[in-house]
Amino acid sequence: MPLVRVEMLKGRSPEYKEKVLECIHDALVDAINIEDWDRFQRIIEYDKNDFEFPSFKSDSFMIIELTIFPGRTKEQKGQVIEKITDNLGSRLSIDPGDVFIVINEPPLENWGIGGNQKG
């Protein structure tokens, strides 16, 4: 049950944002075998004054945070990062240098789903 948070500049079309989420979801399905229905994704958009990043990055720059259950291997996490970046590049022409990904793995005891503690 990955939780996906994408932060980017405002001004993109609904179709563009939908494609960003598809790129990420498809990578998660391929790399860590999540179910296709397992979509807990959100995009947070910022005005240029509220989203600081290095001047050598383009306006396509985005930060992607994945919060996942623990237990994936280093290789699986590497595949997720590579596949997300590849998908964004091939489908939306986003330069790999404009994709910043971090993976968080809180212990199962820190997950509450349907009112129940997971771990």
Image (cartoon, grey):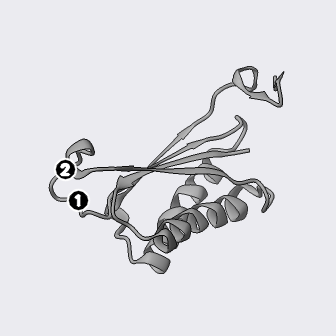
At label 1, counting other C-alpha atoms closer than 10 Å, the crowd grade (few under 14, some 14-19, many 20 or more) is few
Query: Is 13 located above or below residue 50 in the figure?
Result: below
Q: Which residue is mark 1?
A: 57
Secondary structure of the residue carrying numbered label 2? loop
75 or 80, which is in the foreground? 80
Q: Which mark is residue 97?
A: none
At label 2, counting other C-alpha atoms closer than 10 Å, the crowd grade (few under 14, some 14-19, many 20 or more) is few
> Horizontal placement of 94 versus 49: left or right?
right
* Mark 2 in CB contact with mark 1 (< 8 angstroms): yes
Q: Which residue is mark 2?
A: 54
Secondary structure of the residue carrying numbered label 1? loop
Instruction: State how far apart marks 2 and 1 are (Cα).
Output: 6 Å
Amino acid identity at mark 2: Pro
Amino acid identity at mark 1: Lys
Percent position (x, y) of residue 82?
Answer: 52, 62
Residue positioned 76% across, 53% down in the render: 38
Percent position (x, y) of residue 43?
Answer: 49, 52
Percent position (x, y) of residue 75?
Answer: 62, 52
- Quadrant containing the C terminus is top right
The image quarter in which residue 3 lies: top right
Query: Is 13 located above or below residue 91 in the figure?
Result: above
